[in-house]
């Protein structure tokens, strides 16, 4: 009797424990009934959306934006898919995404290559080992399957349907989005999801009816459902065999079926419990649109009409593929601590599709013209520097008119960054518009400097550039965001704050302007305050935290202070400068981590450094050195830097007295601090040659303009 009572009591205790655990689990997972649907429509363009009424309906009631699709080095293929589900940019190819339904032979293959299964999974990546091998030396150190692990750790299930298979290639890259770190997915169908159809590329198409039916069977248990529509992917691979007319006809037919399927998905969703995302992780359908940014549409709970942004980009209408994982995790109330991206946010706006088309056109135009325009600027700068330095070296006599011509040319080149910065205020959504506005601005600027080409003009231009960049930093790139001297969102290296090109301009004008202020007002405090404020703006997380740029201008500021206090650059002062710089960077990092809910690269890098140690420091140093060495060998900016150095040596050789007077004067403090800052920027930035060359080029022009003061030079 006592044993029965004891057993009964134990049973009650166990039952209560189970109920408490289930209740606690439910309390910890209040969003277990939420669903995220990710529909992959690879090669989708903004032009396609105009003929897709169901997607337009989602936009009218949801968000649309542009997504950077870059992995480590490519905008196409499997890299973007793997990056979505990783903590950082990831290497991947089709061989590393060999997903199959785990039954029979593929179950044995998976267990042989990876190990035994813990629990029931429908799909496994038998190529997961290759994916890890590819990323073994990845400088970004990605956590593969970060989203999948996050969801599985919270009890959420994942599912994937569809493929992009052809006769030659097994393409299951969409499954990379949902897998965990072992390559496992709970539900789905990848192997048996196509129908024979001679009207489609390779003779088969995705069976959307079957996908809808199988989703109904598992959606109560699944929280993340990824669907690869596949047919546009196959059309893209087959397109070289098709004429333009047939290609367009088949594409229109395929888009119509995809749009109908998306409408069916929407009808079967509970909006207040669901999030629908339409993604094209592989950018560019070159026969339609060669944009490297692809459309992204969001619809569902708490999403109002408008555009998107994230703390990763801090730009309206643009997000990174790294932001998809955190958005899914956030919606399901799961962790995204291991992911570098940030959750996508909505911005209210009307006529969103028109707005996104407009900024896409401007970004693509800037991206196309960027390298050519900068190359042209670099070549002209080299040419002018060599011509003028040759005059000094060869001791050639020139008359007053030639002096005036050179001064005008120097002012034109010195003001070119200003022209490119202000040109971004125009809606240049085509190359023709960009060229037209640039020519108009050069013409107006040229007329002004022909009339006004004295020292005041140089001081005025320097001050104007300095004020504009300060204003631009304070207001989140409102002026420069479409400038060729600003960031290129298609590259994805930086989306806000100040990049190395603009940092080179800013370093030069900031030091020169404060040298001019020191001379004009004979006051030490004014220029030092301006330089310190400049350092704070460049380094503060709120404004993008360009670490290399911060160190450059901070060292320039310290050197400027030493100069105006008539202190020598001794070993003691050098150590002091290093200590001050380290304290400032650590302080900025602390502010970023502790006070910024979405830390910048600085905060995240320091956090990773504390968590993973020397490997992160090694990767950062290696990345910066390898990038600088590559650019040093191949970049036009190397030649610009050497031309500037060559010119300064020529001036030093032939015009020692004038140069000595300039350098020893109060403006010379700004010149020297700018040179020192440029050297530091070259050493500590991953594109430091560009920063150093641009800043040194502007300083050289300033020196030449100041030297070309008399009626004759020798």
Image (cartoon, rainbow, N blue to C red):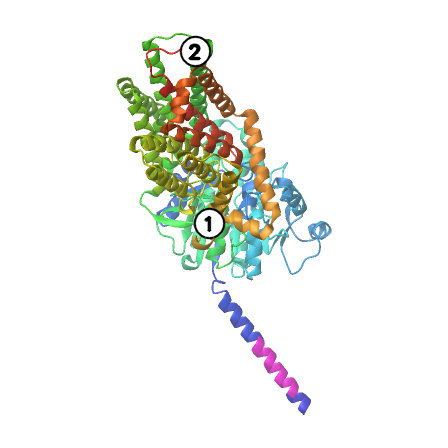
Q: Which residue is mark 1?
A: 587
Quadrant where the N terminus is found in the figure:
bottom right
Q: Is residue 184 above or below residue 78?
A: below
Q: Which residue is mark 2?
A: 391
Residue depicted at 57% across the width and 54% down the height? 148
Q: Nearer the viewer, residue 200 or 529?
A: 529
Secondary structure character of the magenta stretch overall: helix
Residue 616 lies left or right of residue 369; in this view the side is right
Q: Secondary structure at mark 2?
A: helix
Q: Is residue 7 magenta?
A: yes
Q: Residue furthest bottom?
A: 1
Quadrant where the C terminus is found in the figure:
top left
Q: Residue furthest left?
A: 451
Q: Is residue 497 visible?
A: yes
In the rendered structure, which segment of residues is drawn in magenta? Answer: 6-17
Instruction: Please tell me in which quadrant of the rendered image residue 675 appears.
Output: top left
- Numbered circles on residues, count: 2
Mark 2 → mark 1, Cα distance in angstroms? 49 Å
Q: Which mark is first along the chain, 1 or 2? A: 2
Q: Position of residue 621 (x, y in %)?
A: 58, 39
């Amino acid at each position: 009797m006592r044993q029965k009572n004891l057993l009964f009591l134990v049973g009650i205790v166990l039952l209560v424990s189970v109920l408490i655990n289930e209740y606690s689990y439910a309390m910890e997972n209040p969003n277990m009934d939420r669903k995220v649907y990710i529909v992959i429509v690879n090669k989708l363009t903004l032009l396609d959306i105009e003929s897709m009424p169901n997607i337009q309906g989602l936009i009218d009631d949801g968000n649309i934006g542009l997504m950077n699709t870059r992995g480590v080095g490519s905008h196409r293929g499997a890299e973007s898919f793997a990056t979505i589900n990783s903590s950082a940019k990831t290497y991947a190819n089709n061989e590393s995404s060999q997903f199959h339904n785990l039954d029979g032979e593929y179950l044995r293959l998976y267990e042989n290559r990876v190990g035994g299964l813990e629990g029931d999974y429908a799909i496994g990546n038998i190529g997961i080992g290759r994916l890890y091998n590819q990323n073994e030396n990845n400088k970004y150190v990605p956590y593969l399957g970060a989203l999948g692990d996050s969801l599985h750790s919270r009890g959420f299930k994942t599912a994937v349907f569809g493929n992009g298979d052809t006769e030659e290639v097994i393409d299951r890259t969409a499954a990379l989005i949902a897998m965990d770190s072992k390559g496992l997915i709970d539900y789905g169908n990848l192997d048996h999801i196509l129908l024979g159809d001679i009207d489609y590329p390779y003779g088969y198409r995705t069976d959307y009816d079957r996908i809808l039916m199988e989703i109904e069977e598992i959606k109560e248990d699944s929280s993340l459902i990824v669907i690869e529509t596949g047919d546009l992917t196959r059309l893209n691979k087959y397109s070289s065999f098709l004429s333009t007319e047939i290609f367009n006809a088949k594409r229109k037919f395929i888009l119509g079926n995809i749009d109908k399927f998306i409408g069916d998905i929407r009808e079967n969703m509970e909006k207040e419990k669901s999030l629908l995302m339409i993604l094209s992780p592989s950018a560019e359908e070159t026969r339609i649109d060669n944009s490297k940014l692809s459309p992204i549409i969001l619809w569902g709970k708490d999403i109002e009409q408008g555009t998107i942004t994230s703390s990763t980009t801090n730009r309206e209408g643009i997000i990174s593929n790294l932001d998809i994982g955190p958005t899914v995790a956030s919606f399901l109330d799961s962790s995204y601590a291991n992911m570098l991206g940030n959750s996508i946010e909505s911005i209210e706006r009307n006529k969103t599709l028109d707005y996104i088309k407009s900024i896409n056109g401007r970004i693509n135009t800037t991206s196309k013209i960027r390298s050519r325009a900068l190359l042209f600027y670099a070549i002209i700068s080299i040419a002018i520097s060599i011509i003028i330095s040759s005059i000094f070296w060869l001791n050639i006599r020139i008359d007053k008119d030639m002096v005036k011509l050179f001064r005008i040319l120097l002012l034109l080149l010195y003001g070119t960054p200003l022209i490119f910065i202000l040109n971004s205020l125009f809606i240049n959504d085509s190359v023709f518009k960009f060229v037209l506005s640039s020519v108009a601005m050069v013409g107006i600027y040229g007329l002004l400097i022909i009339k006004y080409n004295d020292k005041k003009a140089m001081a005025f231009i320097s001050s104007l550039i300095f004020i504009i960049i300060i204003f631009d930093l304070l207001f989140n790139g409102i002026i420069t965001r479409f400038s060729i001297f600003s960031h290129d969102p298609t590259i994805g290296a930086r989306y806000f704050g100040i990049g190395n090109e603009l940092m080179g301009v800013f370093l030069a004008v900031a030091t020169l302007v404060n040298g001019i202020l020191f001379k004009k007002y004979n006051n030490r405090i004014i220029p030092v305050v301006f330089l310190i404020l400049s350092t704070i703006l460049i380094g503060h997380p709120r404004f993008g935290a360009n670490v290399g740029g911060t160190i450059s201008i901070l060292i320039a500021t310290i050197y400027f202070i030493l100069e105006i206090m008539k202190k020598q650059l001794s070993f003691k002062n050098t150590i002091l400068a290093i200590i001050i710089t380290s304290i400032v960077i650590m302080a900025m990092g602390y502010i970023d981590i502790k006070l910024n809910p979405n830390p910048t690269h600085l905060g995240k890098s320091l956090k990773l450094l504390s968590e993973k140690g020397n490997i992160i420091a090694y990767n950062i140093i290696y990345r910066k050195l390898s990038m600088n060495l590559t650019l040093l060998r191949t970049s036009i900016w190397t030649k610009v830097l050497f031309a500037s150095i060559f010119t300064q040596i020529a001036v030093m050789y032939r015009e020692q007295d004038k140069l000595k007077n300039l350098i020893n004067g109060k403006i010379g403090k700004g010149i020297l601090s700018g040179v020192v800052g440029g050297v530091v920027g070259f050493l500590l930035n991953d594109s430091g040659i560009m920063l150093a060359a641009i800043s040194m080029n502007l300083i050289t022009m300033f020196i030449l303009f100041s030297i070309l003061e008399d009626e004759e030079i020798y």
